[in-house]
Image (spheres, grey):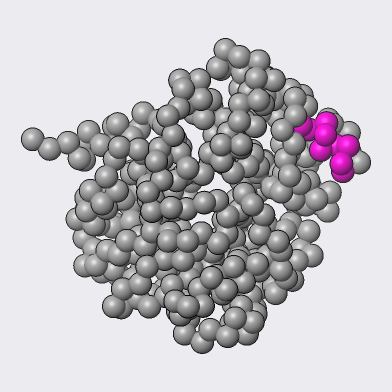
Amino acid sequence: MGDTEVTAQDAELLNALQWDFPLDERPYAILGERLGLAESDVRARVNHVKELGVLRQLSAIFDTRALGYTSALIAAKIDPDKIDEAAESLNDHPGISHNYKRNHDYNLWYTIAVPPGENLDTHIEVLHARSGATVTRKLPTLKLYKIGVKLDMTGNTAADAKAEVLEHERPERRVDMVAPTLAELERNTIRVVQEDLAVVERPFDLYGEQLGISGAEVLTMLQHFKQEKWMRRFAAVMNHRSAGFKANAMGVWAVEEDSLEVIGPRMAGFAAVSHCYRRPTYDDWPYTVFTMIHGRNAKDCEATVEAIRTECDVENYALLWSIKEYKKVRVRYFTADWDTWTSANLITQ
């Protein structure tokens, strides 16, 4: 395929890869049956959208907290003249997956996760000092209303459209989530299936070869991960900007305590909202509900925010734009780079 654009059939395929990837020994054949395409054509198209940079990877998407990792969103106030250096000083931390400059006094925002047995606050203290922040705010999830990035590549979803929040998009969150006891094969499988799925006829067999088991056994393990709710789904991870979703806004809302359990799920029900959380407040930060909104442009994001404001009747809100991306990756679980970072930064005499 020599095209440099995403075709209508590519868009339908990308939606299928994001929303309902088949856990089958021949997943590309199943997708072909659904879309009326030959299996070889599906694989060619998957390779094509990868080459375009639209599709980052196909892999297992795990639930950080369910695996026993502790995580939080962090907001930091940085001297604007030093923000680039501050951001880069944090990016070697293996648990920082997203790191953005935003248009607010809290101008550096990053997400951090640490493995079972690690103290999140200790990591945050080190990063606060390293970044030179005047203030660092920890904003953990108090209630998760929705997590699930689904970019409608067909362009048919309106800014104010609604979508059912599926069970895997609202995984359980508790103050103390005990880390599961993982068998060696379970842990090794997590390490393997978080990496990109091959675009071959029987791709799960290749995972199996790395683990010394069959492709069918890999699929059984993935179903086990879903049942245990360690894995939210197996799906495509998109490159938002290459996919045409160039705007990224964080809408934060000062929802009153007694309205949270009505308003939070209502905000999560907007299709353009990929993440919706309840988070703590501070004296200088009154916002209780966070909504991440993706649009093809700023106008789309603003239309979604206006629809949320109108329907939910919340007037005290702020819209924080992502104006520079310093890091955007997936958290990789149970890898050796954690030990490397910890020994270099946290080991004390």
Count the labels in the image. 0
> Residue 135, position in %: x, y?
24, 67
Highlighted magenta segment, given as a residue range: 27-35
Residue in the foreground of this view, choosing between 107 and 339: 339
The quadrant of the picture occupied by the C terminus is top left
Tell whether position 119 is magenta: no
Residue 32 shown in magenta: yes
Question: Would you say residue 94 is visible in this rendering?
Answer: no
Location of the N terminus by quadrant is: top right
Across and down, in percent, residue 129 comes to 19, 55
Q: Nearer the viewer, residue 9 or 113?
A: 113
Q: Nearer the viewer, residue 237 or 214?
A: 214
- Determine the residue positioned at 78% across, 59% down: 154
Q: Residue at x 22, y 33 (%)?
A: 343
Apparent side of residue 314 relative to residue 112 in the rendered image (left or right):
right
- In x, y percent, where is residue 203? 69, 25
Query: Residue 161 in the image: x percent, y percent?
Result: 73, 70
